[in-house]
Amino acid sequence: MTARIYRPSKNAMQSGQAKTHRWLLEYEPEAARTVDPLMGYTSSTDMRQQIKMSFESKEDAISYAKRNGIAYRVIEPKEKAEKRHSYSDNFRFDRVGVWTH
């Protein structure tokens, strides 16, 4: 019964950073998923896969796991390197191979 503690990244349909500041605690799957031969549904006998708890900080999630005797693994987020661009860079004359307007 190992848990993952991580901060989720934004999805592809998101332009902002909403819902990416909280830390999640999820259990790693213990049993493999099976496919129902008749209907093709994917199912599992592991009910802990359905549990997802959110915390304000990484320390809160770690202390919860320690209090309840849960083995955990912390996955640190990869921070995005922001590139500063000027609006006027869109209209530079030395841009090669890029259509501007």
Image (spheres, rainbow, N blue to C red):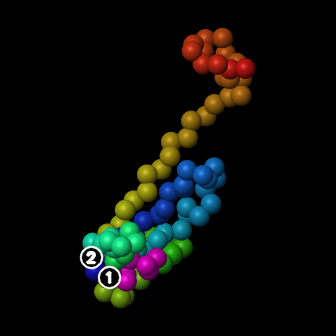
Along the line of sight, which residue is nearer the eye, 75 or 44? 44
Q: Residues within 10 Å of mark 1 (few under 14, many from 20)?
A: few
Q: Which mark is residue 32?
A: none
Q: Residue at x 60, y 15 (%)?
A: 95
What is the quadrant of residue 83 in the picture? Answer: top right
Give x and y (percent) for residue 71. Answer: 28, 78
Earlier along the polypeptide chain: callout 2 or callout 1? 2
Q: Is residue 51 magenta?
A: yes
Q: Is residue 79 left or right of residue 13?
A: left
According to the picture, the residue beneath numbered tag 2 turns out to be 31
Pointer 2 with pointer 1, Cβ within 8 A:
yes
Residue span colored magenta: 45-52
Of the 4 image quadrants, the one containing the C terminus is: top right
Q: Report the amino acid beneath label 2.
A: Ala
Q: Residue 15, position in %: x, y?
A: 63, 49
Check the picture and name the quadrant holding the N terminus. bottom left
Q: Is residue 91 above or below residue 51?
A: above
> Residue extending furthest bottom?
68
What residue is rendered at 51% in x and 75% in y? 55
Q: Could you say where residue 21 lies in the image, as x and y percent from the top left? A: 55, 63
**Quadrant hosting residue 99:** top right
Residue under numbered circle 1: 45
**Relative side of 63 to 33, left or right:** right
